[in-house]
Image (cartoon, coloured by chain):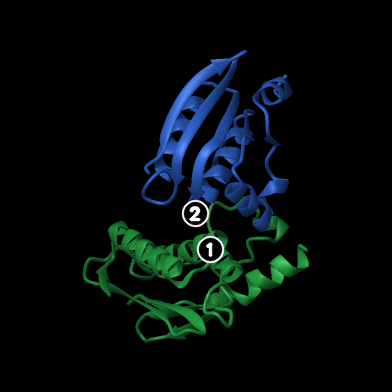
Chain colours: A green, B blue
Amino acid sequence: MTLSSTMESVSQVEAAAGKLAAETGLDEDDCFHVTMAAREAAVNAVLHGNEYDPAKRVTASFENNGKELVITIADQGKGLDPESLPDPLAPENLLRGTGRGLFLIRSFMDEVRFRQLHPGTELRLVKHLNQSGAGSIKSLRNAFDAG
Amino acid sequence: MALTIASREVDGITVLDLSGRITLGEGSVQLRDAIRGLIGKGTKNILLNLGKVDYIDSSGLGELVSAFTTAKNQQAEVKLLNLTKRVHDLLQLTKLYTVFDIKDDEASAIASFK
């Protein structure tokens, strides 16, 4: 989907991600994590990438290939070096009002990849599915460890 | 569901009962305005009841942090009450659990301000 740089678009991405996650048979926690990661990525694209510029677009795609859920979100902004972002868990950063979005995305998804588009940034979010096509390896491992 | 905020006083403590989502574009600004309004009027003790907050994004977390720091800068206190599992897990994940005074029952939360 190609979307405008608005909060309405963020809601559309969130809804689409939630629908895909639910249809894949992910459990409630994984559905929430995927939906939240997609929303955070969309907010980054609209707010930080495109800066709400009506001339710039956000593109989003959603795929279940049986082995993984792949959500790709791109903006047309100046580009981003993710390594330059401050660590939100560092003690000196805990009281910052911003800067946790990418950390949450990385926490909730199994793979997160950046690609510079010149202009713009593309974020590829991946959630691994188990052999039956549902649930993520990370969530299954967590469930096993919990006994 | 958009954020609704209901205010009440208990033993001199202002309790804000929040319901809905605290997210960019939906509730974060409302929360910010509510907190700043109270602190601007001289309110020193604010308890945020998050028992009906089912979703908070990174912007919402940022607003909670801003509420904490705004209050602290004005010699006021903001505490959190009744975290849902999801909000609890997010605060732990982001280490914000170490920042806030978090309570799970209102009576002890109110008493803790004194």
Residue A125 at x, y = what percent? 49, 77
Residue at image x 53%, y 56%?
Answer: A98
Residue A83 in the image: above or below residue A48: below
Q: Which mark is residue B84?
A: none
Estimate how packed mark 2 is, as few (under 14), some (14 to 19) or many (20 or more) residues with alpha carbons within 10 Å: many
Q: Is residue A69 toward the left or the right of residue A89 in the image?
A: left
Residue furthest to the top = B11
Estimate how packed mark 1 is, as few (under 14), some (14 to 19) or many (20 or more) residues with alpha carbons within 10 Å: many
Chain label for disc 1: A
Residue B81 in the image: above or below residue A79: above
B26 or A126: which is nearer to us? A126
The span from disc 1 to disc 2 (Cα, nearest Å) is: 11 Å
B56 or B71: which is nearer to us? B56
Residue at image x 60%, y 30%?
Answer: B74
A106 or A138: which is nearer to us? A138
> Tag 2, which secondary structure?
loop
Answer whether labels 1 and 2 touch (C-beta < 8 Å): no
Residue B73 at x, y = what percent? 61, 35
Residue furthest to the front = A132
> Tag 1, which secondary structure?
helix
Residue at image x 61%, y 53%?
Answer: B90
Q: Depth-wise, is mark 1 or mark 2 nearer the camera?
A: 1
Q: Which mark is residue B57?
A: 2
Residue B57 at x, y = what percent? 49, 54
Chain label for disc 2: B
| Same chain for the residues under marks 1 and 2 in the image | no
- At label 1, which amino acid type do we have? His
Query: Label 1: which residue?
Result: A33
Give the image quarter of residue A144: bottom right
- At label 2, which amino acid type do we have? Asp
Q: Is residue B49 toward the left or the right of residue A55 in the image?
A: right
